[in-house]
Amino acid sequence: MKEYILKCNQYNIVVYESGLGNIPLVLLHGGGLDSAMLSWREVMNSMPEQYVVYAIDLLGYGKSDRPEGMKGQLFYQKHISAVESVVDQLHLDKFVLSGLSMGGSISIGYTLKNPDKVTALIPVDSWGLVSKMPMHSLYYWYVNTSLLKTSYRLFAKYRWMVKWSIKYSLIGYRSKISEALIDELFTLCQIPNPEQSMQDYQRSSLTKYGTIPAYAERLKELQMPVLFINGEKDSLVTVKLAERATQSVKNGKLHIMKGCKHWPQKERPEEYVKVVDAFVAGLYAKSEFATK
């Protein structure tokens, strides 16, 4: 696994690379305490040899810089611009792009802006498909108070709360919630202001009456093959939303990961790898795509 730092505007962004193949795959993680290695380590270690895989620590996450002033109307533009810079510095003319949750919405936004760069798009339990949160008014109030910070302070103090959070919303099968995973997340809760990136993300993604970005009406613009992957038991990005999104795309497919919640590729990386490889390999067998 290679690790290096790229300069994007004035900020440092860390990128991880694995594999020596000729099919480039770029991976974007989700929000909260997430990072490239937390969400994608197992996938990167399992991708077939024909791939070269890049996972990016997005601004505010992992080992990348944590700039102030991320939240607001330009939140997604800033992230998309950073991904554009990374891709340019990696000299990727065309590539497969996959993103989880927040990273899924960034991947969709990037692809809508740069359709000729993305040979195939793979959103995973993607934000941007959700029009409203469950109990939206209450949640909007919650993220705009200090309660989010209080929640993270409790996570930093009580390990059992971290385990409960994983079980409640992220992973469907208890057997997949290892002590090592709980420890990793509990340790991440100890960093200074661990809630800041999540707060920036959520305050930039919710209005009083809806969500940002709202991609449901723009998905029809995607002409490349799109594979939506979704956890069967995800209560936020539901199967119904994923089905609706798939129907909106000209070349859309859907894979439901049985029993999984909002972190399916972490819960069953081997299934993600198998499904993605079958999808992508079939496309490359039919066409000659430019690579790195």
Image (cartoon, grey):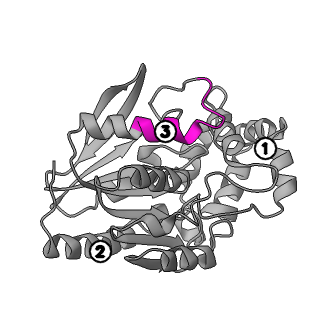
Looking at the rendered structure, the secondary structure element under dot 2 is helix
Give whichever of discs 1 and 3 has the lower sequence position: 3
Q: Is residue 214 left or right of residue 103?
A: right
Of helix, strand and loop, which one carries label 3? helix
- Per the image, the residue denoted by label 2 is 279
Q: Position of residue 115 (x, y in %)?
A: 34, 56
Residue at (54% x, 26% y) in the render: 66
Within 10 Å of disc 2 (Cα), the crowding (few <14, some 14-19, many 20+) is: some
**Can you say whether 110 is above or below 289 in the image?**
above
Q: Secondary structure under badge 1?
A: helix
Q: CA distance from mark 1 to mark 3?
A: 20 Å
Crowd tier of the residue under label 1, counting other residues whose Cα lies within 10 Å: few below 14, some 14–19, many 20 or above? some
Amino acid type shown at disc 1: Val
Q: Residues at badges 2 and 3 in contact (C-beta under 8 Å)?
A: no
Instruction: Name the residue rendered at 13%, 56% in the picture.
Output: 22
The segment highlighted magenta reads 68-82
Q: CA distance from mark 2 to mark 3?
A: 27 Å
- Callout 3 amino acid: His
